[in-house]
Image (cartoon, rainbow, N blue to C red):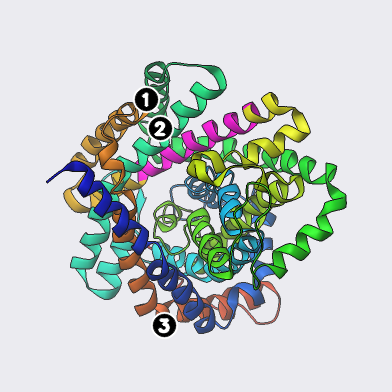
Amino acid sequence: MRVDLISQWVAEISAWIWGPPMIILLLGGGLFLTIRLKFFQFRYFAHAMAQTVGRIRKNTDHLEGTLTPFQAFTSALASTAGATNIVGVGVAIAIGGPGAMFWMWAVALIGMASKYSEILLGVKYREKNEEGHFVGGPMYYIQKGLGWKWLAVLFAFGLMVEVIPSSMVQSNSISSTVKTAFGWDPVVTGIIITILTAIVVFGGVKRIGNVAEKIVPFMVIVYLIGATGVVLIHADRLPAVIADIFTHAFTPISATGGFAGAGIAMALRWGMARGAYSNEAGMGTAPIAHATAQTDHPARQGLWGVFSVFVDTLVICTMSGLAVLTAGTWTQVNAEGGEAALANAVPLAFGQLMGETAGSIFVSVFLLIFVMTTVGVLIFYGEKQAEYLFGLTFSKIMRVVYILSMFVGAVGGLKFVWQFLDILLAMIVVPNMIALLFMSKEVKEETEDYIENIYKVEKGLKKPTSPDTGAGA
């Protein structure tokens, strides 16, 4: 059978899976959890902000866990903040129109319940490994909470393998970006990023947490300042842009410039897909990082999931989207050039603030650093799956495999493997969402316990008791 025929089949299967089926699963599942939890993410949003960003520097060393809650959060954010939040948003708008932004917001607001739930379960069912570090994630709460080891194994195996093509794609995006911006040979870039990745991941989860804690917040803030600058120089267009976002979420938009026009279905599809991709709510990756956190209750760490989706999609993605919409660059890119051409919408927008060359370099540097932090966390995720399936020794072998795949991807090798990325990703989303739906009653009970015995006590609405927090052993 010809390789190109297999590639075509894989592409068609991937496109179908990540069309209506996955959107229905993620959006429908998130909506179910939102209702089951009585709209928890909205009713307690202010509390979530106070318990997360409001307590970033609070000392938690007296609590059980490996990383501080903030380090766990930034580690998880490192795996999601990157290309999808920056150039991916530009692609979604260039294809789906301004209305895509509305649906991106919708899937984020609903996805907060999914991310909160999976982190809560990740902390509740975590355990200590042979090195004394806390480990957790969907594979643990599926096996221990549902008793379905076969489903836990499916998730773990899918994510363990998925990290290989994912690392390749990420490293290739780095080498391509660096070659475009600075003219470096991919081989040289591959060697450098392989060495840098090895230095980070061989330091273990604590080094990954320390690196993420220092780099991710700084990069996010600087990027947001740049995006805000783009919006401000076109501030007169902002009211019309906001109106277009809400109007064209429910009505078609005509072709203009390089934009081919889009109906409601196109805005819905691209907005939801990019929203789901950007924050990974319901995909099961975040609880692996958050299971390491020092916390006194699973629900308290789950609040970081609400904050994570807020930062990832409602802040970073929104500013990227407003930048390309106010600058008008979403109509200047050519849809016929594919996603590579459409991805220029954001660099072009920044070019209007800094100059074309400087804008391109600015975005390239941010993508480079974001992707580097992403890969370090992805490899940690993969290692934890290998450890769950085959033990600690095998996880260290897989660490070497992942690091070597960085070089292979950077030079453009084994591209055929990349095509299976979306299918492998589906293999981890489906088991995790099934678990979240079947364990929603447990999530609800833990949430109610937190509200009654911690939230109300801290608010002075109830006298303190001594509940079993269930934060992991």
Residue at 69%, 47% in the rendered image: 324
Residue placed under numbered mark 3 in the picture = 441
Q: Secondary structure at mark 3?
A: helix
Res 467 seen here:
no
Q: Provide the residue span drawn in magenta.
A: 361-380
Q: Characterize the local packing of mark 1: few (<14), some (14-19) or many (20 or more) Cα atoms within 10 angstroms.
A: many
Residue placed under numbered mark 2 in the picture = 171
Please say if the residues under marks 1 and 2 sit with CB atoms less than 8 Å apart: yes
Residue placed under numbered mark 1 in the picture = 194
Question: Which of the marked residues, 2 or 3, is nearer the chain's N terminus?
Answer: 2
Residue at 46%, 40% in the rendered image: 374
Q: Secondary structure at mark 2?
A: helix
- Foreground disc of the pair 3, 1: 1
Q: Position of residue 121 (x, y in %)?
A: 40, 67
136 left or right of 229 in image: left
Res 274 seen here:
yes
Residue 343 found in image quarter: top right
Which is more toward the observer, 27 or 379?
Answer: 27
Q: Position of residue 231 (x, y in %)?
A: 78, 46
203 left or right of 458 in image: left
